[in-house]
Image (spheres, rainbow, N blue to C red):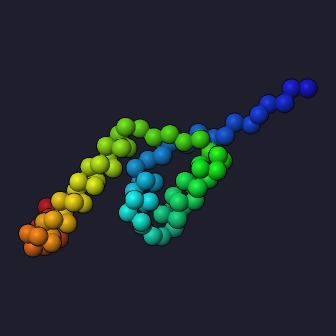
Amino acid sequence: MVVRKRRRPLLYLDTNIFLDLIRNRTGQLAEDSRKLLREISQDKYRALTSSFTILEIMEDEQEQIYAEREITICKKSFDEVRT
């Protein structure tokens, strides 16, 4: 009898999974992201991401830094920064 080891599912992690953690977001989707990352660290799943995800995270960080600077230092309104 041959016993095959069950393969763990392979998941692709998109940008929002990481941003939930980085931004310390709240709500059910953010909690689901944290749970998923815990389960990956416990070897329940295999996971991968792409260089595009890393670039999107970097771009998001730069946009946040720009917006915070414009609002706090330049005294612009949110609507001015958003457009």
Residue 15 placed where, x, y %? 40, 49
Expressed as whole percent of the image width and height from the top left, the position of residue 2 reads 86, 26
Name the residue at the right extreme: 1
Quick check: 51 left or right of 49? left
* Residue in the picture at 67% in, 40% down: 8
Residue 74 is situated, as x and y percent measured from the top left of the image, at 8, 69
On-image quarter of the N terminus: top right
Image quarter of residue 83: bottom left
**Residue 40: in sight, yes or no?**
yes
Number of numbered discs visible in the structure rendering: 0
Query: Is 14 on the left or on the right of 11, as rendered?
Result: left
Residue furthest out toward the left: 74
Residue 80 in picture, x, y percent from top left:
11, 67
**Residue at x-position 79% and y-position 30%:** 4
Determine whether, in the image, residue 17 is placed left or right of residue 11: left
Q: Is residue 2 above or below residue 11?
A: above
Viewer can see residue 79? no
Residue at 37% across, 37% down = 51
Q: Which residue occupies 29% across, 48% down?
A: 58
Q: Is residue 48 left or right of residue 77?
A: right
